Image (cartoon, rainbow, N blue to C red):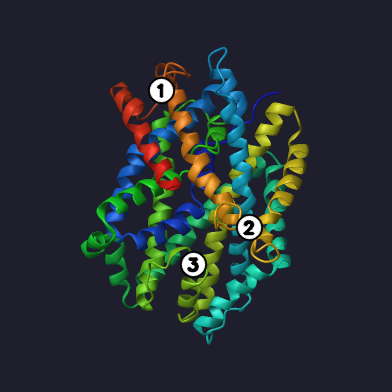
Amino acid sequence: MQRESFKSRMGFLLVSAGCAIGIGNVWRFPYVAGENGGGLFVLFYLLFLLIMGMPVLTMELAVGRASRQSAVLAYQKLEKPGSHWHIHGWFCILGCCLLMMYYTTVTGWMVSYFVKFATGSFGGEMTTEAVNTVFDNLLANPVEMGAYMLGIVLAGFGLCSFGLQKGLEKITKIMMAALLLLIIVLAAHSLLLPGAGEGLSFFLLPDWSSVLDKGIGNIITAAMNQAFFTLSLGVAAMEIFGSYMSREHTLASEAVRICGLDTFVALMAGLIIFPACFSFGITPDSGPQLIFITLPNVFVNMTGGQIWGTLFFLFMTFASFTTVLAVFENLLACCIDMFGWSRRRAALVCGLFIAVASLPCVLGYNLWSDLHLIGERDVLDSEDFIVSNLLLPIGSLVYLLFCVTRWGWGFDNYIKEANHGSGLKISRRLKPYFQFVLPVLILIILLQGLL
C-alpha cells in the first residue's frame, strides 16, 4: 500500500508546528518565565532551543523520512541486524498513549472555559473567590469533565479517520491560521492596556533581583528544560511526520521553521499574559493556575472581558487540539503500519482505548481524589511525570544515540539524510558536539526531572 504524504510543504510545517505548539509552550512557558524572572529566562530558552531542541528534532525527522515508517518499523528498517533499537518504538507508542490519557482532559478544560466565557458564565461582577470556584466545580464534576474529554477523543479520531490530507492536514491548516490570527489580536489588545509596559519589561528585560533570588543555575536549568520539552521530542510524535514529508528540503531548514513557529507562539503568549497581569496588578508567577484562575480574574475585570476571555480560550483550544490531532495520527499510523488495519478501523479501536484509558484522569479529581500513584501525585500528575520526566528525555537520548553512534544507524547515514535537499546544511564538524556534549545536556534534564 502506497504511503500517504502531505499535500504541500506548508501542510507539513503547520501540522508539525501544531504538534509542538500546545499546552507546553502556551500554558507552561508563560508561568515558568514568570517564576524565573522573565527576560533572562527567555534569552536562555532561545539559546537552548537552538543548541538542543533543533538538533534532536532533525534526528527524529531523519529517522521518519529515511524509513517511511512509524516508530517500531522505522527502527527495524534502519537498525543493524541483531540490534534491538526497535524496542524503543514500543515505548514511543506507550508515551503517546500516556500523553493522551491526560492531555484530552486538559484540552477539555480549555473547551469548557471557552464555552463558559462565550455563554456569559463569567460575569463582570464576579469576585476572586467566585472565579476560583468555577475551576473547583469543574474538577469536582466527573460528568462534565468526562463529556468534554469524550468529545475531544471523538472529534480527534473522527477527523484523523478521513486521511492525512483530507483530515489532519486540512483541519490543522484552518486551526493554525485561526490560532495565529487570534494570538496577534489578543497580543495587540494586551499591549494597549494601561500599565502594559511594566509587563512587557518584565517579560523581555532581565530582572536581576529575581536572578539573585532564584539563582542563575536554576534559571538556566529551567530554560533548558522548557526548550527541550516544547517540541514534544522522544515519543515519535515528530518522527511520524518525517515519514510523510518530501525530500526536497534539508531537515535543518524544516526544523528552523518549525521551531520558529513554536517560539513565535510561545513569545506571543507571553505578550498576551504579562501585560494583562501587570495591568490589573496580578502577579505573573502564579504557577500552573495562571490559565484557569489568574487570567479569568483578569478578564472579568476587563472592559469587554467576555469577548477577550472567549477569544483567549478559543486560542488555547486550538493550540491544545492541534497537538491532540498530531499524536492521534501517530497512534493511527502505528496500527496501520504494524497490523495492516484500515484507517477507519484504527480510528475506532484507538478511539475506544484512549476514551477508556482517559477516565482515571477524569475521576482522579473527584471520585478517585484519594488515589495517588507516584508519591503524593494525583493521576494526572503521575501520568505527566512518567511522560515528561522519563519517556521524553530518555526517548530523545535514544534517538540521539541511534543517529550518532556506530552501534545505531550511524552519524554518516543521519547527516546524509538530514542534508538531502535544498536549504540549511548541518556541518559534519558538529559530530563531537552531537556525540559527547548533547547527551550530557539531555542527561542533566533527565536527572533534574527525577530529583
Quadrant of image for the N terminus:
top right
Q: Who is closer to the viewer here, 319 or 98?
A: 98
Residue located beneath label 1 in the image = 404
Q: Secondary structure at mark 2?
A: helix
Q: Is tag 1's residue or tag 3's residue first in the polypeptide sequence?
A: 3
Mark 1 neighbour class, 10 Å CA radius: few under 14, some 14 to 19, many 20 or more: many
Q: Residue 246: x percent and y percent?
A: 52, 28
- Tell me the SS state at disc 1: helix
Residue at image position (53%, 57%) is: 178
Q: Position of residue 132 (x, y in %)?
A: 54, 76
| Disc 3/disc 2 C-alpha distance (Å) | 16 Å
Q: Up-down: is 376 above or below 450?
A: below
Task: Give residue 105's mark.
Answer: 2
Residue type, label 1: Val
The relative height of residue 376 versus residue 92 in the rendered view (above or below) is below
Q: Nearer the viewer, residue 357 or 63?
A: 357
CA neighbours of label 2 inside 10 A, class few (<14), some (14 to 19), many (20+) = many
Q: Can I make out residue 421 in this image?
A: no
Would you call the spot at circle 3 few (<14 residues within 10 Å), some (14-19), or many (20 or more)?
some
Q: Amino acid at mark 2?
A: Thr
Q: Position of residue 446 (x, y in %)?
A: 43, 41
Q: Residue at x 41, y 56 (%)?
A: 29
Q: What is the spatial separation of the Cα atoms under label 1 and label 3, in whole angstroms? A: 40 Å
Question: Which amino acid type is marked by label 3?
Answer: Gln
Q: Which residue is mark 3?
A: 289
Q: Between 139 and 127, which is closer to the camera in this rendering? A: 139
Q: Are marks 1 and 3 in contact (CB under 8 Å)?
A: no
Seen in the image, is 320 located left or right of residue 427? right
